[in-house]
Amino acid sequence: MKQPKLLDYVLLTVLALIWASAFFNIKIATYSFGPVTIAFLRVFFGAIPVLLLCYFKKIKIEAFSKDWHWFAMIGFINLVAPFFLIAYGVKSVQSNLAAILMSTTPLSSTILGHFYTKNEKFNFIKTIGILIGFSGIVFFIFR
């Protein structure tokens, strides 16, 4: 495993800022667009860089195979439905509450990973790291 450098921390911070600002931007978008439109736009504009990367790296996209319906179902369950539900939910709650609720994903993933996998068990470092991360989200949102 490589040691993280300053650039790695800077990129992680930029990623966190972009991720956290999504809920604020979705809240603003719900004043003009419906949840279906927001979900479509998120998937559409997210697919463009992926398709370009696949084109330039000459990566074959398996979703265009004979099993396309399975890939469509996975894409719907993992992307379209959550994006729609997030946009629908943000219409009813404040964007800071939505960000806090979404930040519980690492907590629940850690708990589920402990019970359903063999190599992702709880340890002190993981637990402290996730609690610090979640505390940071709460601190920044309510500051």
Image (spheres, rainbow, N blue to C red):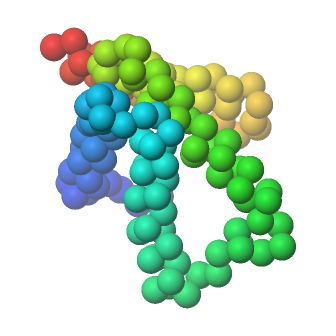
Of residue 63 and residue 84, the one placed in the foreground of this image is 84
Residue 1 percent coordinates (x, y): 47, 58
**Residue farthest along the right direction in this orientation:** 66
Residue at 49% x, 49% y is 40
Q: Is residue 4 visible?
A: yes
Residue 125 percent coordinates (x, y): 47, 28
Q: Is residue 128 visible?
A: no
What is the quadrant of the C terminus in the image? Answer: top left
Residue at 36% x, 37% y is 33
Residue at 65% x, 52% y is 75
Of residue 103 and residue 32, the one placed in the foreground of this image is 32
Residue at 24% x, 18% y is 141
Left or right position of 78 against 29: right
Q: Is residue 64 above or below residue 122?
A: below
Q: How many marks?
A: 0
Q: Is residue 129 above or below residue 117?
A: above
Question: Looking at the rendering, which quadrant does residue 90 occupy?
Answer: top left
**Residue farthest along the left direction in this orientation:** 143
Question: Looking at the rendering, which quadrant does residue 31 occupy?
Answer: top left
Of residue 105 and residue 79, the one placed in the foreground of this image is 79
Residue 48 percent coordinates (x, y): 43, 67
Residue 94 percent coordinates (x, y): 31, 15
Q: Is residue 25 above or below residue 67?
A: above
